[in-house]
Image (cartoon, rainbow, N blue to C red):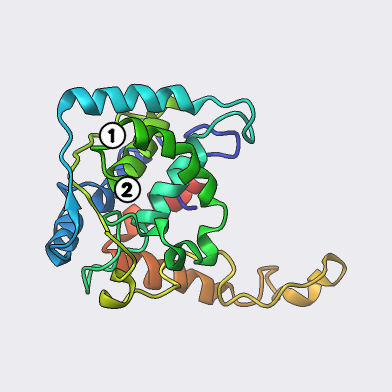
């Protein structure tokens, strides 16, 4: 997942100038106030259900999410990274040209989108949030997943990301065919690289400069096939990949 968390659960992208760019870049595809979000909202079927949270409910959900964040039984003790990954993978399917995908819909609740190989393991994140959804049924799954990531960023030392509710949930997975959705919209960490090679034969997979054979294709995939497709510029891509992921 290419977003704003380190291996130890902390958020490290938010320092000097990169922080604001990184958080703003994520907000562009996850906020109902953004142009990218609005474009997608216009393309939605009227069959979806919209929810708008009142301030008291939003604050109550925030407090409930904060109680979840520290979990000694999970990984390094923090749920923030996997909840941020859930929000990113929900948002990262956005296609600016067709107005499809994105954080609206919460399509990962259904088998087709959940089966995308890049979404492996995110059923755990969704399960952690299910009690919150049951306690606060008026929040959409789409809103809950994004708000959980925002709270996770704040809880691990990042900035408070402004949140606006109003995302809608798909009523079923008919959207997948109706909207022309396909696998491959999320970044694939090894796309266009040579096939898996045993460690004792690794030298056969490297070019003269020591890079993995096919690295140019991977760079093109991440830049052109993923982030340009979502409407990001180069500055925002660098902020997310170098400031957030690394």
47 or 236, which is in the foreground?
A: 47
**Total count of labels:** 2
- Badge 1 crowding class, 10 Å Cα cut-off, few under 14, some 14 to 19, many 20 or more, is some
129 lies left or right of 138: right
Q: Secondary structure at mark 1?
A: loop
Residue visible at 64% across and 29% down? 73
Q: Position of residue 226 (x, y in %)?
A: 39, 67
215 lies left or right of 98: right
Whether residue 246 can be seen here: no
Residue visible at 30% across and 38% down? 20
Q: Secondary structure at mark 2?
A: helix
Query: Which image quadrant for residue 205?
Result: bottom right
213 is higher (above) or lower (below) than 85: below
228 or 173, which is in the foreground?
A: 173
Q: Position of residue 147 (x, y in %)?
A: 32, 37
Whether residue 64 can be seen here: yes
Name the N-terminal-most of marks 1 and 2: 2
Q: Which mark is residue 26?
A: 2
Residue visible at 30% across and 71% down? 174
Q: Which mark is residue 161?
A: 1
Disc 1 and disc 2 in contact, CB within 8 angstroms: yes
Q: Position of residue 204 (x, y in %)?
A: 79, 77
Furthest-right residue in this view: 200
**Disc 1/disc 2 C-alpha distance (Å):** 10 Å
Query: Which image quadrant for residue 155?
Result: top left
Q: Which mark is residue 234?
A: none
- Badge 2 crowding class, 10 Å Cα cut-off, few under 14, some 14 to 19, many 20 or more, is many
17 is higher (above) or lower (below) than 239: above
69 is higher (above) or lower (below) than 216: above
28 lies left or right of 220: left
């Amino acid at each position: 997942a290419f977003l704003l968390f380190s291996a130890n659960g902390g958020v490290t992208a938010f320092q000097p100038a990169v922080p604001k760019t990184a958080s703003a870049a994520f907000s562009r595809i996850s906020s109902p106030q953004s142009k990218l979000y609005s474009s997608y909202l216009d393309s939605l079927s009227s069959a979806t259900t919209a929810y708008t949270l009142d301030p008291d409910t939003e604050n109550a959900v925030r407090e409930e999410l904060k109680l979840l964040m520290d979990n000694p039984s999970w990984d390094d003790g923090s749920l923030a990274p996997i909840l941020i990954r859930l929000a990113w993978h929900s948002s990262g399917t956005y296609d600016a040209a067709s107005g499809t995908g994105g954080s609206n819909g919460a399509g990962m609740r259904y088998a087709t989108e959940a089966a995308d190989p890049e979404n492996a393991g995110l059923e755990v994140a969704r399960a952690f949030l299910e009690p919150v959804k049951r306690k606060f049924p008026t929040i959409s799954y789409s809103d809950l997943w994004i708000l959980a990531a925002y709270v996770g960023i704040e809880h691990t030392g990042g900035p408070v990301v402004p949140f606006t509710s109003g995302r809608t949930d798909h009523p079923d997975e008919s959207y997948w065919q109706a909207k022309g959705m396909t696998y491959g919209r999320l970044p694939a960490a090894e796309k266009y690289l040579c096939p898996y090679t045993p460690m004792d034969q690794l030298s056969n997979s490297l070019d003269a400069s020591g890079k993995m054979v096919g690295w140019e294709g991977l760079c093109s995939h991440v830049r052109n096939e993923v982030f340009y497709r979502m409407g990001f510029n180069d500055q925002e891509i660098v902020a997310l990949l170098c400031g957030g992921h690394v």
